Image (cartoon, coloured by chain):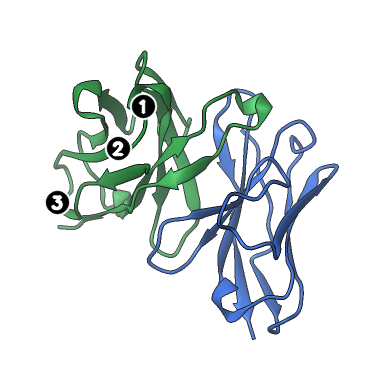
Amino acid sequence: SYEMTQPPSVSVSPGQTARITCSGDPLPKQYAYWYQQKPGQAPVLVIYKDTERPPGIPERFSGSSSGTTVTLTISGVQAEDEADYYCQSADSSDAWVFGGGTKLTVL
Amino acid sequence: EVHLVQSGAEVKKPGESLKISCQGSGYRFNSYWIGWVRQMPGKGLEWMGIIYPGDYDTRYSPSFQGQVTISVDKSINTAYLQWSSLKASDTAMYYCARREVGYCSGGACYAQYWGQGTLVTVSS
């Protein structure tokens, strides 16, 4: 298995843009997915296949990929976006790998 | 509408056995992988393993191989996670999640639907 590296924390003011990165060697070959988790709740999928947004997820959430790094971008951050965010991918045997998580604080 | 409903919180003593469940509804249960994810208190998500109800194909993370058993009862659309001898370090929230249809290489290795979680507390 391999590791996916995320920054432990990101802080932004309301209305600004938050960018959360996730790095891992297999990422150019494997898709990445992003989950939002608020305290006491199950994770919620916000981005799949690097850049796709599931139904019901606000347009301010977007994903991008470049080489071994994928990025979750939240444009016009709102207070309700404060949460932990996890990237996830799969290794060559289809085992899931999660990043360590990033705590987004809205100042 | 897809739902995954997990069994309730458990409080156990070290050495005891435990089986928690995850019942799926609103979709063709046999056709989707069901995975289990651990979240220790204040920590991140860890993938434990996954099972395909259609043919019982089961895969484990190396970190959890031999430590837990994943199974399924197709007759009641329910997946299980079980321990034969719990340890204090098994204290965590456990989530089941439905993997999408398709190959991981095609971008299907993710879960849009999750159970509500089962809190397992192991303490003497």
- Disc 2 from disc 3: Cα separation: 32 Å
Q: Which residue is mark 3?
A: B13
Residue on which disc 2 sits: B25
Quadrant in the rendering for residue B98: top left
Residue nearest the observer in this picture, B114 or A88: B114
In percent of width and height, residue B34 lies at 39, 32
Q: Which of the numbered marks, if any, corresponds to residue A34?
A: none
Q: Earlier in the sequence, mark 3 or mark 1?
A: 3
Q: Chain of mark 3?
A: B
Residue positioned 37% across, 13% down in the render: B55
User: What residue did someone put label 1 on?
Assistant: B28
Which residue is rendered at x = 19% and y = 52% of the image? Answer: B8
Q: Nearer the viewer, mark 3 or mark 1?
A: 1
Work out which quarter of the rendered image holds the C terminus of chain B and state it. Answer: bottom left
Q: Residues within 10 Å of mark 1 (few under 14, many from 20)?
A: few
The hue of chain B in the figure is green
Q: Is residue B41 left or right of residue A104?
A: left
Per the image, label 3 sits on a secondary structure element best described as loop
